[in-house]
Amino acid sequence: QVQLVESGGGLVQAGGSLRLSCAASGIIRSIARMGWYRQAPGKQRELVAGITTGGTTNYADSVKGRFTFSRDNAKYTVYLQMNSLKPEDTAVYYCNVVGLSSAGAFNTWGQGTQVTVSS
C-alpha cells in the first residue's frame, strides 16, 4: 500500500516563502502522475502544479512564476517551493500520486497540510 506524508505547511506573511514536501512509501513500480492540489474554504480542490510521465510540468495560472514543482525520483519525494505568497494562496495543500505498486494501480492522496498567508 502506498502512503504519502506531507510536511512544510504553516503560517507566513504575504511575500514570504514556504516549501512543501511529500514523501511516498511503499513498493512503487512506476509513477504516472504526481501533483500538488489545494482547497480553500468553500472552494473546489484545484491543481496547483503537477508532472506527468512525459515530464511535462503544469502550473495553475495563479501560481506561475511564484511556485516551483520539483521531485527526487530516488526518494519518491516531491516538493513545492512557494515564493511571493499571497493571502489568496491560503488553503489546505494536498499531494497526489498515481501509479503502479506491487499491489496494483494506486491513486493516493496525502493527508493535507495547511498553508496560511497573512496580509
Image: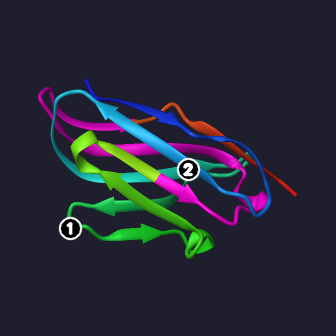
Residue that mark 1 sits on = 54
Which SS class for mark 1? Answer: loop
Task: Specify the farthest residue to the right.
Answer: 119
Question: Which dot marks residue 19?
Answer: 2
Q: Residues within 10 Å of mark 2 (few under 14, many from 20)?
A: some
Magenta part of the protein: which range?
A: 80-108
Q: Quadrant of the C terminus?
A: bottom right
Task: Specify the farthest residue to the top.
Answer: 1
Above or below residue 57? Residue 17 is above
Residue type at mark 1: give it. Gly
Q: CA distance from mark 2 to mark 1?
A: 24 Å
Q: What is the x, y in percent for residue 82?
A: 59, 59
Q: Identify the image's colour scheme: rainbow, by chain, secondary structure or one colour.
A: rainbow
Which SS class for mark 2? Answer: strand
Q: Quadrant of the N terminus?
A: top left
Q: What is the x, y in percent for residue 86?
A: 75, 63
Indicate the quadrant where residue 51 lies. Answer: bottom left
* Callout in the foreground (2, 1): 2
Indicate the quadrant where residue 3 lies. Answer: top left
Residue 104 is one of the magenta-drawn residues = yes
In front: 23, or 107? 23
Left or right side of 25 for 35? right
Residue type at mark 2: give it. Arg
Q: Residue at x 79, y 58 (%)?
A: 87
Q: Residue at x 53, y 69 (%)?
A: 60
Q: Residues within 10 Å of mark 1 (few under 14, many from 20)?
A: few
Sequence order check, earlier mark of 2 and 1: 2
Majority secondary structure in the magenta region: strand
Q: Residue at x 76, y 64 (%)?
A: 15
